[in-house]
Image: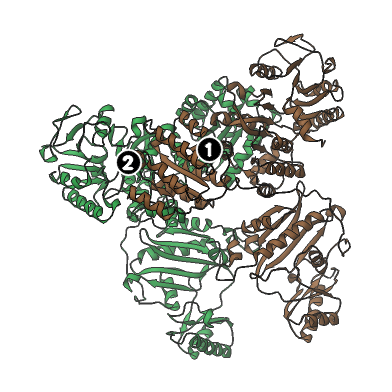
Chain colours: A brown, B green
């Protein structure tokens, strides 16, 4: 089912001819709606109604079936009952049809019989080289080329403007709603696509195609699940490389939502934290609500380019609302640098009761003194201190008398500071709002929404970090250590060392003499631990002795450990006793890898103790990743301050921690065929300059291999 | 300045006569605007222009000054420069004028000179029994009685409908914006008030007055700071007792916001966490954004009564958006109980591919089958399982053909289930939306906003918990322990015991013999600690010995402690050594009291260790409070799971913890004149049924008393 998507999908989304199987002359029927829309909006290609019971439909000659058509046809719309869909497609010759959109429901969403019917449809399509959109979908529109391959009633209530947003939705109902919202909010679309059951083409295919489509600048996607994680990663990477921001709403964030999602869609819901990691990693913006989805799309569509960094300037005519905006900015980590001293002085000279700091409060004076707003903002931006500017004008936006001032302000800002995107919060009449938007200026009635939106897209305007997709095949048993059924702690630590991770040196002593020799080699107080593939919680069986120094103490500890372990777990296989130096002082962290069924190895990081166990304060990334991504995942946890040296302690070696995580991710990715889970607990973060060290690890083989 | 607010403020907000000092015939002047508005909107009372340089203004005879008026006048509007305001008011006879609104700026907001002028104005007003609104304010409107004592341009762009919302804003710019937003969103107002510099009347006065005003059902307040905490508490309590919800936006949530607020207003910004505690405690709903402010006001105004509990039913025509709504509901702690089994069965019989669980997905079938929506919702609500219902209709709201279905749905739901408030999320044309709102149904384009709004007001429809304001005078030195300059640990623990808190028994031993006697009385392993008013961190000076058992060990420990303390801190006054039983195992908590300059004693609660020190995971309440409030503040912390018995531990005695906090709050309140700070660290939470116990405490006298 993996075909080169660019060419085959272009025949689908930009067709020169469209055949409608099940074409109807009855208005409102799903076989009539696309023909009506295509004719109404002046589709420039050929329209071919197919219906054995009619000669002419909508003024066009109708054919009895695809086999009656001599020419090739780019797109076939199937608007016939599920039982007839496969038959209809069967009548096409191999190579004749580029793609088919299947409107009708009654396939996999209805159970086993429907799934079988869907599978049959897929086989027929594949044999004939036909790409499939749907079934059980609302179809798609290519807004710029007037392709309306849909039976959604949404365009009947008014069409959206052509524009740079490519919109794709797994759900038809959401898609129709989103189309209507785009129209209400004045967003321009290039394409609107609903993917339905995704028998062949899924949301990822569409994202990848839109990333390559010249008409699309921004991609907005709604998804409920994903079956092919690698494809979604490729698609998001393609969008990032093409510098096209992706705004995505993925349902099922919470358990309640995931439960609801599972009852709704057959697609694997996946672990939501993994989706979160995926979107962060590939720079896609996840929107939690439909409002946020559209605010982000609106900003990315309206602005020539998103802000290049996170430094925000605020200008307000109300000090109080300025403070409200500062609250929001602080919440989402936007910086509010102060204007230059002379900028502040000039403002205070002009308006003594103004506030020259950021938020800059020009006071109500801006209403009676037309040039004040522009002069102040211009002055603020002169030195490149800000990446974006947010302006609050309160109710003054409704004033017709003040309109020329505001219009000139937006024009001049765009002309003089094209690199500093502008958002105005005020109540403008709709026509005025649209005029400002044409100047590239965002308008939000709610100032907090303006700030939140800026915060979400800030930095996207900078050069994108390359995010390659590592498609190298899994390597197996490449190291010195052969593949084993199970790994004891010493072997697990050896694997980590092979993987380039800093693992505490340790020796497996098979008897007391060996333990004494091992300890002598360390020349430091030791820790002794029982080593057994059957004992995970060593302390619970008296299997750990700390701070052992003398030879006699080592012999005692060795004997005690074996006795205690045998007493608690008589059946456990005991490989020996591990001898290692006592660990230095540091902050206990946990790093782990688990294998997500959709996305493969996922790396987890967190602090030990209550942070992981009570607060679930962990971050995730999909393997493999580099140092920068590892640093981001470390900074993401709530307890990060502890690593920075809270409570008077020295800061930890965060760089070494990041290197360890990156190494772990590369190992997990390369050896994904061999290992399904790794847990390093604790991974000790030492003071700055001293590195990090893994003290214990559990490695589990791919469970399917036993 | 504290006068009985109800009668004097009624002359202000519902005046039978209004004199405008500085009346003008020039359109747009601040002395002309109120006259124009009053005449335009048919104000029923007497309008008296005052201006020595005119005989007739706006068709009305003008007087040269207030002294030329024989009659009493309820309200005087001062629209003259700051320098003339006091003079103008001086010409009024005592008792003649009820209240004055001072539009003009140039008072305390400009510095010391202005502050002096404002103080003079206050003195003159007080001498004559005149209440003051402003100065430096936009005035107010009584929308139902057509009183426009304002020069805000907002009403000129269209007036708001009369309704049940009383709106008060410290900031004029915010107020004008809020007025315009209320108009745009179709909210009905009873009053609109801007308080400006608050020389006399502040936001709290207005809340209290609106709480007693028969025209007002809901109060919306915007504040930047507060100088009189007790008054604000009284006002919020009055609103709660009157069953009138208060929605409040208070700026300065974050440090950036508080900084901006401080540069803007002279009012004490206060500690924002304390405001948060205040609003929670008095049941006021704090809105973080202007959108939220209006969503809450809209819901409380439109619904007859807010939901009585937190059980939400969701009906959707899109399973995916249903999941999105479930995500939001889970985030804010709304419960989603499932419908009865036969309700589910009936739906599935009718629509086999529907989902009968909550969110209930009736699928797109609801569009083609008009009765399905009503039948399903009706069935769901039949058994009283839900406190509110949220419905998502996607783009179907735009369909004229479907309007009768939706209209009938809203009507029938209101008629059959008047106690279950309804919110519909869909894109309706404005007129349709207003029609649904008239049926008492909320309409939100964004389904998540609908859920969030329901979550914020859910439970407000239940009987309000009484929240009394304790105005008893501070008691002083009521207990056995006399007031001391400083309190050592033993004395601090004694104070806690007096306050009714469970404090670990302890004895101050003045010598080794006394320590041995004290330990003998305990019959358990002991802890010994140095007691000195000069040593706070006892462990740091070797001043603590744990788990001491035998007599000789006690003597050794006693000697070691004194020697070590004297070595580390030769100048410290040493009162002796404390002997106490070793503490049982429990979860370490911290409880504290500090004195807020505006609100008095504030109690803090948190878990020990990283929770307080790294995560700042603490909750606050204003003293005094009872057990229920204490339980709420315990449940509020993020680490609450640890008290519930995370990590396999037994649950803690949370009730005992709550009792301890309530006792601490009553003590802190009653002895507020004596003590400025108490810290109990650790307050040990023992397993359920075993109580809680304070192990150490620091009490600090009111610093102003030395």
Is residue A458 at all visible to an observer of this figure? yes
Is A82 left or right of A281, judged from the image as shown?
Answer: right
> Relative to A612, is B683 on the left or the right?
left
**Frontmost residue, A604 versus B151:** B151
Quarter of the rendering containing residue A5: top right
Image quarter of the C terminus of chain B = bottom left
Q: How many other residues sit within 10 Å of disc 2, few (<14), some (14-19) or many (≥20)?
A: many
Badge 2 is on which residue? B193
The answer to which image quadrant residue A338 occupies is bottom left
Q: Position of residue B265 (x, y in %)?
A: 35, 52
- Mark sitting on residue B388: 1
Where is residue B245? Give x, y as percent: 41, 43
Residue at 61 percent of width and 30 percent of height: A163
Tell me which chain the residue with mark 2 is part of.
Answer: B
Residue A448 coordinates in the image, percent (x, y) = 48, 44
Which label's residue is closer to the chain start, 2 or 1? 2
Residue B656 image position (x, y, % from top left): 51, 63
The chain ID associated with circle 1 is B
- Quarter of the figure with residue A40: top right
**Crowd around label 1: few <14 · some 14–19 · many ≥20 (10 Å):** many
Name the disc covering residue B287, or none.
none
Above-or-below relation of A449 to B474: above
Mark yes or no: residue B129 visible.
Answer: no
Looking at the image, residue A532 sits to the left or right of residue B108; the answer is right
Q: Reply above or below: A396 against A527.
A: above
Marks 2/1: CA–CA distance:
32 Å
């Amino acid at each position: 089912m993996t075909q080169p998507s660019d060419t085959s999908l272009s025949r689908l989304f930009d067709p020169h001819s469209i055949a409608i199987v099940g074409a109807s002359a009855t208005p409102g029927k799903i076989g009539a709606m696309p023909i009506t829309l295509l004719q109404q909006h002046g589709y420039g290609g050929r329209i071919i109604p197919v219906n054995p019971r009619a000669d002419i439909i909508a003024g066009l000659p109708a054919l009895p079936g695809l086999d009656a058509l001599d020419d090739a046809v780019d797109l076939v719309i199937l608007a016939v009952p599920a039982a007839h869909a496969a038959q209809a497609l069967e009548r096409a010759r191999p190579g004749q049809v580029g793609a088919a959109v299947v409107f009708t429901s009654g396939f996999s969403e209805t159970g086993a019989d429907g799934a079988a019917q869907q599978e049959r449809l897929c086989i027929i399509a594949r044999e004939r080289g036909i790409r499939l959109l749907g079934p059980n979908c609302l179809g798609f529109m290519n807004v710029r080329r007037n392709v309306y391959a849909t039976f959604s009633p949404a365009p009947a209530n008014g069409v959206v403007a052509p524009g740079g947003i490519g919109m794709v939705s797994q759900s038809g109902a959401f898609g129709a709603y989103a189309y209507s919202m785009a129209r209400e909010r004045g967003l321009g679309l290039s394409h609107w696509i609903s993917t339905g059951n995704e028998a062949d083409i899924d949301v990822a295919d569409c994202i990848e195609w839109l990333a390559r489509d010249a008409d699309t600048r921004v991609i907005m996607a709604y998804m409920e699940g994903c079956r092919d994680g690698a494809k979604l990663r490729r698609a998001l990477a393609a969008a990032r490389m093409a510098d096209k921001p992706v705004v995505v709403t993925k349902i099922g964030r919470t358990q309640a939502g995931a439960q609801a999602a599972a009852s709704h869609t057959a697609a694997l819901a996946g672990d939501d934290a993994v989706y979160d990691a995926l979107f962060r990693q590939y720079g896609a913006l996840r929107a939690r609500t439909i409002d946020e989805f559209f605010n982000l799309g609106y900003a990315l569509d309206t602005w020539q380019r998103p802000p290049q960094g996170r430094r925000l300037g605020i200008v307000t005519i109300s000090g109080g609302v300025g403070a409200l905006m500062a609250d929001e900015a602080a919440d989402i980590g936007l910086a509010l640098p102060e204007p230059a001293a002379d900028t502040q002085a000039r403002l205070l000279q002009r308006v003594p009761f103004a506030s020259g700091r950021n938020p800059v409060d020009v006071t109500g004076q801006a209403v009676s003194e037309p040039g004040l707003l522009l002069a102040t903002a211009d002055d603020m931006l002169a030195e490149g201190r800000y990446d974006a500017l947010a302006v609050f004008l309160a109710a003054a936006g409704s004033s017709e008398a003040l309109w020329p001032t505001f219009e000139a302000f937006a024009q001049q800002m765009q002309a003089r500071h094209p690199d500093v995107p502008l958002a105005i919060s005020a109540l403008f009449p709709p026509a005025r709002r649209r005029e400002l938007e044409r100047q590239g200026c965002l308008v939000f009635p709610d100032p907090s929404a303006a700030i939140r939106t800026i915060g979400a897209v800030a930095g996207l305007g900078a050069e994108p970090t390359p995010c390659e997709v590592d498609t190298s095949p899994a390597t197996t048993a490449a190291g010195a250590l052969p593949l084993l059924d199970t790994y004891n702690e010493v072997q697990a630590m050896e694997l980590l060392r092979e993987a380039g991770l800093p693992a505490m040196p340790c020796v497996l002593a098979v008897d007391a003499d060996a333990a004494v020799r091992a300890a002598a080699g360390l020349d430091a107080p030791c820790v002794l631990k029982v080593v057994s593939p059957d004992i995970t919680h060593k302390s619970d069986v008296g299997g750990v002795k700390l701070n052992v120094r003398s030879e006699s103490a080592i012999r005692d500890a060795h004997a005690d450990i074996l006795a205690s372990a045998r007493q608690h777990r008589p059946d456990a296989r005991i490989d020996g006793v591990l001898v290692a130096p006592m660990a230095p002082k540091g902050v206990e962290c946990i790093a782990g890898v688990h294998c997500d069924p959709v996305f493969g190895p996922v790396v987890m990081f967190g602090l030990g103790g209550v942070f992981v166990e009570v607060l679930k304060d962990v971050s995730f990334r999909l393997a493999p990743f580099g140092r920068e991504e590892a640093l981001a995942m470390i900074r993401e946890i709530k307890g990060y301050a502890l690593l920075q040296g809270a409570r008077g302690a020295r800061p930890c070696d965060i760089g070494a921690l990041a290197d360890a995580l990156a190494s772990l991710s590369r190992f997990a990715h390369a050896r994904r065929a061999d290992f399904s889970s790794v847990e390093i607990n604790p991974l000790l973060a030492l003071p700055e300059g001293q590195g990090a060290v893994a003290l214990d690890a559990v490695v589990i083989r791919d469970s399917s291999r036993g």
